[in-house]
Image (spheres, rainbow, N blue to C red):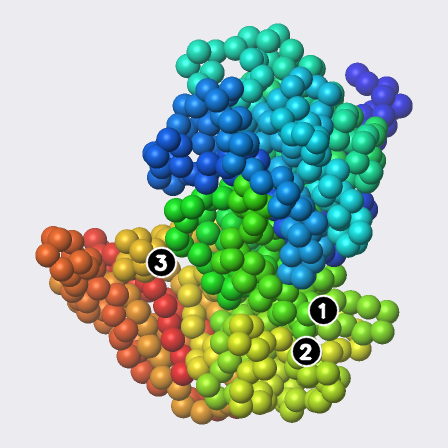
Amino acid sequence: MKSYSQKFVLITFLLIFLSNFSNAQKQTNERAKWFTDSRFGMFIHWGVYSGAEGIWKGEKLRNDNNYAEWLLYRNRIDREEYVTLLERFDWDEINPEEWVILAKNAGMKYVTLTAKHHDGFALWDSKVGDYDLGNYTIPKRDIVKELAIACKKHGLKMGLYYSHWVDWEHKYGWDHTREIYGITADEYDQYWQEKVIPQMRELLTNYGDIGMIWFDMWIHYSNTVVTKKQLLQLKGLIRELQPNCLVNSRLGLSIEEDPDIDFKTLGDNQIGSKKEDFPWQSPATVAHSWGFYSQESKWKSTTTLLKSLINNASLNGNFMLNIGPRANGDVPYEIIQRMLEMGDWLNVNGEAIYGTQAFDLRKDQHDWGKITCKETAEDFKLYLHVYTWPLNKTLYLTGVLAAPKKVYLLADKQKAGLNFVYSNVVTEIKLPATQPDNYVSVIVVEYNDKPQINDNLVSKTVDGGFSLLPQNQNTTDDNLIINPKERLGTVPAHVEVDGNKTFSWKIYVNEPGEKNIDISYSFQNESKDSKLSLSVADKTISQVISQTGETVGEPGRNYVIDNYKSNRLGQINFKTKGFYDIKLTIEPGENDKVNFQWVWIK
Ligand code: GLC
């Protein structure tokens, strides 16, 4: 039997443990404030590999879908021969300040340079070993130092990428061929203690304030050769030498398990898909490779890149966009152009990105775009990022329970008020005939204080209808499985219903009247035993489910898919303005199965 005081100690420990655990999910570390305020940064992949431009002895990079900075490993190059690529570098032309100026003009607030990538080659004048720039340039060049000076001059934070886990140079560093040939824990620790730790010490001591160290171990340490002890040693060194320096989750520890990790790094080119309360970031490229690759052809558009930045900001995330300069320091024109266009957009619309947060409405609430918000001592602002200017020049904002005090275009310096009608939960904004921005136009909706919201409503789409989906319905059903789209969406997302099932939604109708109700499903049986019914307020309309047949998905390929067809269920008169609960019940007959896709009301 435990004594009272023992129990007390135990409970206190438990409480501390639990509160720490929940902190891990929620907290933004104070030192990461500048980072979350910034939202947009530059990644720089530049190193010995840049001299090859993705081609080695006439052969293209092996592995089609891979990265030019992986050349040494992919094309099985000897590390001594690899450095002969440095002969292609034009040191008179190389000026890191130009990269920093580009970042600044693009509206980015920080840059992160690959100080040491997987090839193990240090871009600074390192005293650790001899595989570093100081040893291969006369007069000695130190790109980290040059970048640090330029960042300071132009007011940007400097981050450093350091490949801690993988190192293809050190005889005991990790190289994936070790999965075949092995390495002992002691050998790996020798690499760690004689290269990683002292090099990190140099970086954290000789270059002033470092904004972040960006590690690159994209799997959890428990699946690697690295031990937790080694990771904590490394993190401890950073905390000791530069307590304000941020550390990303690719250190090998997740932000969920260690609240001392400052931000989570998503996968390469993985854009955010859900709102998080802790800081996070997507690293992204303008095309595909990180290091310069002469064969690159699929450049993303400025609109795509801007939407990625906006999407992330609307979910509390950052976006770090990469440049892969050539061996003479030049940045590909395709990248410069897009970044400058983003910078122009941010010049006008930056207020809707920097220092903003995710708003509480559910993700994908509106089909016209995304929302960010900002709370100040004076007021509360919503920024509506309109991707598609509505053809009827009316924008519906659904779910905010307050009348705005003012609505205007962010691009309009005079802040001329736009007309709006607020009723209950819908704010209907009258837009000018043409959108102010070719990419994304931003509308500011100002309130006195943070408004209350209703986040279980399906909002009106840009064309004035309501799209009721398995994803936006309100019935809580832990067993609900939404089958994702297949065959590039030819087979749409749907729910398989093989027993009675009810779905429910709530809408707010601000334009009363008779509306059509359509439903899309797929049904392959011949029976007439399956039924569906939809009820709104006091009216129910039902239908026997009929066979929808099949379609040829891809001509001549023997690939046939089930039809999902829109069926008119009937009309319902929504007599007055107000909230309506919609309930759909699907009752398949015995041995019948209905694949439900959507209900459309307009
Ligand atoms: C990957 C690659 C690497 C690139 C990085 C950027 O981890 O190994 O080449 O630097 O992602 O996010």
The answer to whether one can see residue 245 in this image is no
The residue beneath circle 3 is 493
The residue under label 1 is: 351
Task: Give the image quarter of residue 107.
Answer: bottom right
- Label 1: how many Cα within 10 Å (few below 14, some 14–19, many 20+): some
* Residue 596 appears in the picture as rendered: yes
Rounded to the nearest angstrom, the CA distance separating label 1 from label 2 is 8 Å
- Residue pointed to by mark 2: 410
Marks 1/3: CA distance?
36 Å
The amino acid type, in three-letter code, at marker 2 is Leu
Marks 2,3: beta carbons within 8 A: no
Is 290 situated above or below 272? above
For label 3, the crowd category at 10 Å Cα-Cα, with few meaning under 14, some 14 to 19 and many 20 or more, is: some
Of residue 307 and residue 331, the one placed in the foreground of this image is 331
User: Label 2's element?
Assistant: loop
Which of 395/531 is in front? Answer: 395
| Percent x, y of residue 452 | 71, 71
Q: Amino acid at mark 1?
A: Glu
